[in-house]
Image: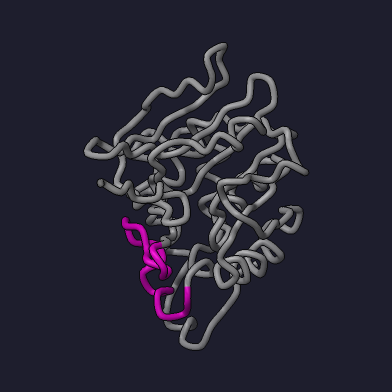
Amino acid sequence: MNQSAPGDAILDYDAARQRMVDAQIRPVQINDPRIVAAMRVLPREACVPDSLRAIAYADQSLELGHGRVLTEPRIAGRMVQIGEPQAGQRALVVGAGTGYIAALLARLGLKVVALESDAALSAIGRRFCAAEAPDVVWRDGALAAGAAGDSPFDLILIDGAVRAVPSALAGQLAPHGRIVCVIWPEGGVATASIGEASASGLATRPVFDVALPLLPELEPAPAFAF
């Protein structure tokens, strides 16, 4: 269900959405037909303030304020794909923002919990999911704490870059579960990565380089030198 705003009548969002998939999604190895089909129908224009609707399908992340963004379409699609989502699995989206990735996973048949700490973003996300993916469960709370009451999760996706995966999230994985996130070490290169539990803790491996800003709430506190 598309949500309209004043002036929308002069913009063909459906045509823009198809161009996004054909020009941005399919050429970058997003070849899961379920993801492609879902991205053809989910209205990204409903995930941004009215002032940004005209560029909702641009090949860039869109600033939502306070250091948060709506993740670029090709990055969002690839992150979902490397998580190998399967219908019936439980998923947690950390930093769910305005709900696009949560709704995308729900459209793939997962049971999705969306965790967000920013009330303004959560309000947009709740409205969006109510229209497009009503089974998504929203939780308000600290991103680093995860959603222990809803765990364990087969898939945890952090929608934003982090220096390291918070330990509480790793502890909420189901056996054989995985975490998909962008890890951006200090002074290093940001990479979309997959983390899986191992005998020595969470083992992560990079999959592809990516440009995505750090989630402000999950940035480590600055160290003080004496």
Quick one: which residue is furthest to the front in this view? 226
Q: Residue at x 27, y 39 (%)?
A: 186
Total of numbered circles in the picture? 0
Q: Position of residue 216 (x, y in %)?
A: 42, 56
Q: Is residue 112 left or right of residue 81?
A: right
Residue 172 lies in quadrant = top right
Q: Residue at x 71, y 53 (%)?
A: 136
Residue 105 lies in quadrant = top right
- Which range is magenta? 49-67
* Residue 86 can be seen, yes or no: no
Q: Residue at x 38, y 63 (%)?
A: 67
* Residue 137 can be seen, yes or no: yes
Q: Position of residue 120 (x, y in %)?
A: 56, 73
The image shows residue 73, relative to residue 149, as above or below, that is below
Of residues 217 and 18, the one drawn nearer to the viewer in this rendering: 217
In the rendered image, residue 61 lying in the magenta stretch gets the answer yes
